[in-house]
Structures are given as C-alpha cells and as structure tokens.
Image (tube, grey):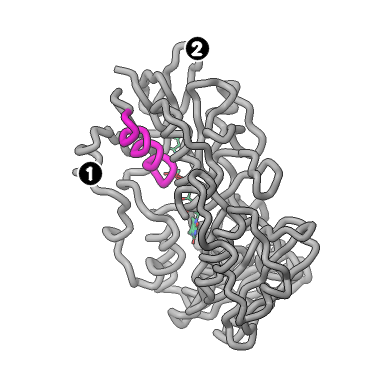
Amino acid sequence: MSGLLIIGASYAGVQAALTARDAGYSQPITMVCDEDWLPYQRPPLSKDFLLGRTSEQNLVLRDNAFFENKQIELVLGHRAVGLDLGTRRVTLERGNDLAFDQLVFATGSRARRIAIPGADLDGVCYLRSASDAIELKARLAAAAEIVIVGGGFIGLEVAASAAKLGKKATVVEASSRLLERAVSPIVSDFLLDTHLQAGVDIRLNEVVASFEGASPRVTGVVLDSGVNIRADLVLVGIGGIANDELARTAGLNCTNGIVVDEHGRSAMPDIFAAGDCANHFNRFCESWIRLESVQNAQDQAKAAGLAIAGSQGPYESVPRFWSDQYDVKLQIVGLAGKYDRKAVRGSVDAGKFSVFYYRDDRLVAVDSINRPGDQMAARRLIARGVSPSPEQAEDPSFDLKSLVTGGDKAGVLPPDL
Ligand SMILES: Cc1cc2nc3c(=O)[nH]c(=O)nc-3n(C[C@H](O)[C@H](O)[C@H](O)COP(=O)(O)OP(=O)(O)OC[C@H]3O[C@@H](n4cnc5c(N)ncnc54)[C@H](O)[C@@H]3O)c2cc1C
C-alpha cells in the first residue's frame, strides 16, 4: 500500500496531510514520527507549560479520532532511518519499511549541542520536545539557580518562566545584545531592561568555557572571562539544526535544510519538504532561508499538500514569529535583514511600540511589543508591497490600515491574511 508518506508529525507534517486530504487526495496517507506523542504544540513548552498553566493534554494539536476520521494513519514511536529513492521505500529503525508514491520530509530541527568540558554532566538540559519540557519542568521545580546559555528566543522565554517561578536565573550571551539576529537594538534593549527588572542576571559579551560539577551533577558554569556562576541547572539554547541527514544521504540537495521550491518540492518531483527542515527562496527577504516558526511550517506544508493533491497554491506568506516573555508579547512580521532605515511607532517607555524597518524605501519588517494592531496592519502592508513613509509610521494619529483597505484583488493576499 503506497500513497503519501510523511516523516515527522508536527506542524508541517500534520498540515501537509490535512491539506492534501482536504484538497481531494484519495490515496492512503501515513505519518511516521519518532516521538510517542500525538502531534502537539511546541511554543508553550518554554512558556505556559513550564509555568504550569497548561497541561500535557492541552498541548495536543489533534486527537486520534480526528486522524481516523481523515483516514490518516499515525505510526508513532518509529524513526525513519533509511530512504531508497529508486525503490521508493523508507526504512524504519525497527526494521520494517514503508513504500510511498509521494514523500514529505517534515522532520523539523533539533537543538544544537554544546561541545565544551562538562557538557555531559547531569543537569545540563536542552528544550525541543515535550519530553525535554517535562524533564526541565521537574528539574526547575527542584532547582534554585539556573544558568541559561544563549539569549535567543528559547533562552529568554525559559529565563522569564524561571524568574516567574522565583528562581535565580542568569543568561549568558556571547554577542553584545539579546536576540541580535532577530531584532534591532531598540527591541534588544527593551527586553534587556524587562529581564533585569524581573531579577534576571544577564551577561552579554560572555562565552561559556565549561560546566563544572560534583560528578555527576552540574554545579557551576565557567566563562571565558574566568567568572564562575553557581548553577544547579543549566539550559542550553544556542539554536537549531535542520534534520536533513536522511534526505542528504539519499542524495537530495541539502544546504542548511532540504532545498525546495515554492511548492515545497525538492529537485525530485514527488519528494517534498516543509517546515524547520526545509530551505526555500523567500521573496520577502530575497534570499534562500530556513525558517523556524509555526507560521512557516504550516504555510509551507499547505503549499506542499496542495501540490501533492494536484492543486496550486505556492508558498508566499509573509514570515511571522512571536515570543511571550512576562507580559510582553513580541511579534515579528517580515524579515528585517540588512535594513537601512527604521521608524518607531508608539512609546518604548510605556512598553508599547513597533519598529518599522525599511530597505531602499520599502517596508520589509515590523517588530511589535504589545501592539498587535500594528502587526495586523503590517502584515497586510508587507504582503501587498505597500510602504507607509517613516513619518507616517511614526505618527500615532496616522491610520496604517487606510493604506491597505479596499481594492483587494483575488490572489494578492496570502490565504492566511
Ligand atoms: C520551546 C520552543 C518554543 C517555541 N516557540 C515558538 C513560538 O513562540 N513561535 C513560533 O512561531 N515558533 C516557536 N517555536 C518553533 C516551532 O515550534 C517550530 O518552528 C515548529 O515546531 C516547526 O514545525 P515542524 O513540523 O517543521 O518540525 P518539528 O516541530 O520539529 O517536528 C518534527 C518532527 O519530526 C520528528 N522526526 C525528525 N526526524 C525523524 C525521523 N527520521 N523519523 C521520524 N520522525 C522524525 C521529530 O522528532 C519531530 O517530532 C518554538 C520551538 C520550541 C522548541
């Protein structure tokens, strides 16, 4: 029994399966995943789940009955370890193999490991999966002092959760500001202040040299500068790596992810990839990019699912991301990249502002802190290639939506807007 085989059952895998089925794909659909869990939401793992505000059950994206109803077979707890493109078969770790007509890689990414002395000590943790989160939550409850390596999204969200739980949290970041690759200095500085006010110790321009321990447990973190920070728990959040080895070994073109077109299709017509494991040319940043976000996983998988069902619907959504830290909601639309001008709307002091980024007079991205209205408008503006002037963006009385109301043309706006 062939049909559509999907490796990975998270946002991209589930979306590809549902889209293909809903668009009329009538052959069997099978999703194989190495995790034992029903497909679940990852974003709450560093936020509400760590804080005890949501349970494991509430993380589930869709239950068994839903998949049965859609005639999508779930093969959970099985890892795909081999792919033969000639015979169109995927081998599972436990020996059996599955045939396919179409294949989707929705294998996501994994946490980058740190390679320094002491990295194997008990209490040095990572956060990628529900199992990781359950372990981290239990360890956090028992810990007094946590050191977080990396001032990126996951590190800062865990720091916020730890501080809220009354723990002494220290973030060690190698660059000169937080979230350096994602946001501008204004937003970095705002987040730095927010964390400092919450009691989090932030060490910028510092590199972790080793972890110390009274074997087997970690007891401290040593920085290159010689500083030693006490820790009974360490969370390493230093980025993700695409799970593209299976595709690469089988001969597919992989460059920081599986290279795909706007339909999520690889160089081989029936082999697709979507989500964290895929690298695509993004027209909004005018370059090849691998994105790690729920929006990207779902929208790219929609394009793949449509192509598999014989429909058309290329992936051309504006990239979006969000992060929750304390009562700060950071939302990002577009990709700022190398911007040459910026404009600030709202009040940084009041903790409600947006930064508009321009390249060659074109609005390319907007970061918002607690200003969801700006985000809604910015999504439409960027999707349509309409740019308010920086003066208009800065003028709080200027209605951004007035530039994008009326005149909707079919097909101009991505379906998610
Ligand atoms: C703690 C945390 C917080 C986050 N917060 C946000 C947020 O606030 N906003 C946001 O937009 N994004 C957030 N993200 C990122 C977001 O969760 C990812 O971008 C998204 O999950 C990607 O979905 P995906 O389906 O591509 O891959 P994944 O969710 O990584 O799923 C891939 C699945 O495939 C499985 N798999 C891999 N290889 C194999 C194999 N060989 N055989 C079988 N199965 C395999 C994996 O185990 C996994 O279950 C967060 C991520 C984490 C970890």
Decide which of tag 2 and tag 1 comes sooner along the chain: 1
State the residue position of label 2. 86
- Span highlighted in magenta in the image: 9-24
Q: Which residue is drawn at 36% across and 36% down?
A: 17
Residue found at the far front of this picture: 407
Q: Residue 55: x, y in percent?
A: 30, 64
Q: In this view, does 274 lie to the left or right of 346?
A: left
* Residue 66 badge: 1
Please say whether residue 236 is visible from this viewpoint.
no
Residue found at the far top of this picture: 87
Above or below, comparing residue 47 to residue 335 in the picture:
below
Q: Is residue 124 found inside the magenta-colored segment of the image?
A: no
Instruction: Tell me which corner region of the image, top left, top right, bottom left or bottom right, holds residue 226.
Output: bottom right
Q: In this view, does 174 lie to the left or right of 158?
A: right
Please say whether residue 112 is visible from this viewpoint.
yes
Q: Is residue 216 left or right of residue 208?
A: left
**Number of disc labels:** 2
Q: Is mark 1 on a helix, strand or loop?
A: helix
Mark 2, Cα crowd under 10 Å, few <14 / some 14-19 / many 20+, is few
